Image: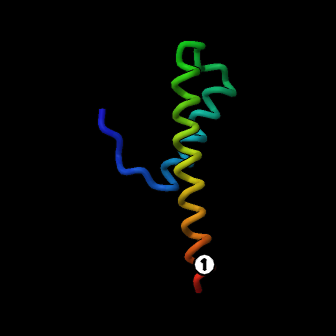
Amino acid sequence: MARKKLTFESAMEELQTIYDELEQGAVGLDELEQKMKRVKELTHFCKEKLRNIENVLKEK
C-alpha cells in the first residue's frame, strides 16, 4: 500500500492515531517496535519542517 505524500498535518495526525492506539492498549507487543520506528520517522520529519520554517523566519 502506497502512502500519500507526507505533510506536517498528516504526520501529526498519524502520530495522534498511534498515540491513541497505544493509550487504548490496541497495539500488541509484536507491533510495538514497528510503531515506535514510525513515530521516530514522523517526529524527525516534523522537527525538520519546523526547523526549515524557523530558518526562513530568521532570514526575513
Residue at left offset 58%, top offset 14%: 28
In this view, which residue lies farthest toward the left?
A: 1
The residue sitting at the bottom extreme is 60
Please state the total of marks drawn on the protein image. Answer: 1
Q: Does 4 sit left or right of 48 as displayed?
A: left
Residue type, label 1:
Leu
Which residue occupies 54% across, 13% down?
Answer: 30
* Rendered residue at 65%/26% (across/down): 22
In which quarter of the view is residue 3 placed?
top left
In the displayed structure image, the side of residue 5 where residue 30 appears, left or right = right
Label 1, on which residue? 57
The spot of residue 36 in percent (x, y) is 58, 29
Which quarter of the image is occupied by the C terminus?
bottom right
The type of colouring in the image is rainbow
Q: Is residue 4 left or right of residue 56?
A: left
In front here: 10 or 41? 41
Query: Residue 59: horizontal and vertical position, in percent?
Result: 58, 82
Seen at 59% across and 62% down, the residue is 50
Secondary structure under the numbered disc 1 in the rendered image: helix
Disc 1 crowd rating (10 Å Cα; few below 14, some 14-19, many 20+) is few
> Is 15 drawn above or below residue 28 in the view shown?
below
Tell me if residue 21 comes above or below residue 47 in the rendering. Answer: above
Estimate the x, y position of residue 32 in percent, counting from the top left.
58, 21
Q: Quadrant of the N terminus?
A: top left
Q: Position of residue 7 (x, y in %)?
A: 45, 55
